[in-house]
Image (cartoon, helix red, strand yellow):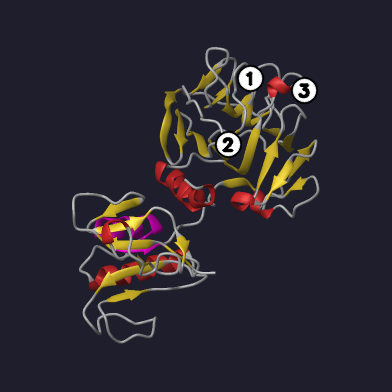
């Protein structure tokens, strides 16, 4: 299969529906099958072209004088080269962008993927490359894409062996790259063994709710409360009963939590909470959302990690979240805003965001 993103020259001030205007180019928001739109007239007589094959790997496109750059596509004429490089690493991408920058009089060499991508963005150079999720400090990585399709074990791919156990058989779906459907009435949830006390943390989850949180006190991801003062982290309805927002925080005798946000039903979200020892921050779909809270304290671990279930109390449907879950990541450090955005970019297409 080949996948392309249609684009057209559109130097007018009027954007074309379904596209994102970048300079004089109208670029399709959604990728399409390679043969669907190629060379077919579009709205207003615009002639559409297909971008590079997105299934191949990352791509950088830049104008250059003949002979200034290598020609990995094997062509010897034209003013555009598409760098198609399958199965390459982040460093390969950085190196190639640094080379392009040097020929364009840019600021390279670059020290990171973020620096490389920012330079490409700032200079109007088209690329299709998504950095993988951040791995530094990663202590738990659950992705339903890696589930074999049966059994109660959801394997931790961080390398730390913190495999999750699926309780009461949540339904697995292969859509969106794989996710689990948790039913509150059937008391479906997942647990992970105690990760210990994490003084600085990041908790990331990709989910969509299928039932409103009205009257619920629950969490998407949290650790078990010890019924005293120890609850290390929670992405859940921490502000209940004041509101049922999805918020990030912890409990050490009182809730220390963000204001949170109200999720729409049947809508995928990436929600991330971080704590760096002084500030709790919340992000939704890669950007700050839900507020922050300045608080200096030491959150404590109270036991197992609970997924789609409240941190304490009895096994009743009101303490469970009803919805779908694809990814859970926990770090023993507070990711930066750039890192959170990077993790969002790494999976957003999978969830149509």
Q: Quadrant of residue 12?
A: bottom left
Marker disc for residue 30: none
Q: CA distance from mark 2 to mark 1?
A: 17 Å
Measured as percent of width and height from the top left, residue 18 is found at: 36, 50
Most foreground residue, 115 or 177: 177
Task: Select label 2 or label 1 by which is in front.
Answer: 2
Residue 70 magenta-highlighted: no
Q: Which residue is mark 3?
A: 315
Q: Please state if 77 lies on the left or on the right of 159 as rendered.
A: left
Mark 1 neighbour density, 10 Å: few (under 14) some (14–19) many (20 or more): many
Residue 115 magenta-highlighted: yes
Q: Quadrant of the N terminus?
A: bottom right
Could you tell which of marks 1 and 3 lies nearer the N-terminus?
Answer: 1
Residue 162 visible to the viewer: no
Most foreground residue, 297 or 169: 169
Mark 3 neighbour density, 10 Å: few (under 14) some (14–19) many (20 or more): some
Q: Which residue is mark 2?
A: 208
Q: Which residue is mark 1?
A: 217
Residue 309 visible to the viewer: yes
Measured as percent of width and height from the top left, residue 326 is found at: 62, 44
Which residue is drawn at the image coordinates 29% and 62% (left, top)? 8
Q: Which residues are magenta?
A: 111-128
Q: CA distance from mark 1 to mark 3?
A: 12 Å
Could you tell which of marks 2 and 1 lies nearer the N-terminus?
Answer: 2
Q: Please state if 335 lies on the left or on the right of 152 as rendered.
A: left
Which residue is drawn at the image coordinates 33% and 64% (left, top)? 41
Measured as percent of width and height from the top left, residue 36 is found at: 45, 65
Most foreground residue, 172 or 217: 172
Could you tell which of marks 2 and 3 lies nearer the N-terminus?
Answer: 2
Q: Quadrant of residue 51?
A: bottom left
Residue 116 in the image: above or below residue 76:
above
């Amino acid at each position: 299969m080949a996948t392309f993103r249609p684009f057209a020259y559109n130097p007018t001030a009027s954007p074309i529906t379904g596209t994102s205007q970048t300079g004089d180019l109208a670029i399709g928001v959604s990728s399409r099958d390679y043969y669907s739109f190629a060379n077919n007239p579009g709205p207003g007589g615009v002639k559409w072209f297909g971008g590079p094959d997105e299934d191949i790997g990352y791509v950088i496109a830049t104008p250059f004088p003949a002979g200034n750059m290598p020609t990995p596509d094997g062509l010897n004429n034209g003013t555009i080269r598409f760098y198609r490089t399958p199965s390459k690493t982040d460093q390969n991408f950085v190196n190639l962008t640094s080379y392009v920058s040097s020929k364009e009089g840019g600021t390279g060499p670059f020290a990171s993927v973020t620096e490389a991508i920012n330079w490409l963005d700032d200079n109007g150079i088209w690329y299709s490359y998504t950095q993988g999720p951040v791995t530094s400090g990663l202590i738990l990585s659950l992705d339903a894409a890696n589930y074999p399709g049966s059994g109660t074990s959801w394997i931790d791919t961080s390398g730390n062996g913190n495999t999750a156990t699926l309780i009461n058989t949540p339904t697995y779906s292969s859509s969106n790259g794989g996710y689990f459907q948790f039913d509150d009435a059937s008391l479906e949830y997942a647990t992970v063994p105690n990760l210990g006390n994490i003084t600085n943390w990041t908790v990331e989850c990709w989910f969509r709710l299928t039932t409103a949180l009205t009257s619920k006190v629950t969490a998407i991801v949290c650790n078990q409360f010890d019924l005293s003062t120890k609850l290390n982290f929670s992405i859940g309805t921490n502000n209940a009963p004041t509101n049922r927002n999805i918020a990030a925080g912890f409990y050490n005798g009182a809730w220390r939590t963000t204001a949170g946000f109200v999720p729409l039903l049947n809508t995928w979200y990436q929600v991330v909470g971080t704590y760096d020892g002084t500030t709790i921050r919340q992000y939704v779909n890669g950007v700050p959302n839900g507020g922050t809270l300045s608080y200096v304290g030491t959150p404590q671990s109270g036991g197992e990690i609970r997924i789609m279930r409240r941190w304490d109390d009895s096994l009743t449907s009101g303490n469970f979240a009803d919805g779908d879950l694809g990814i859970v990541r926990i770090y023993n450090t507070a990711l930066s805003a750039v890192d959170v955005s990077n993790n969002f970019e790494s999976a957003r297409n999978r969830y149509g965001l």
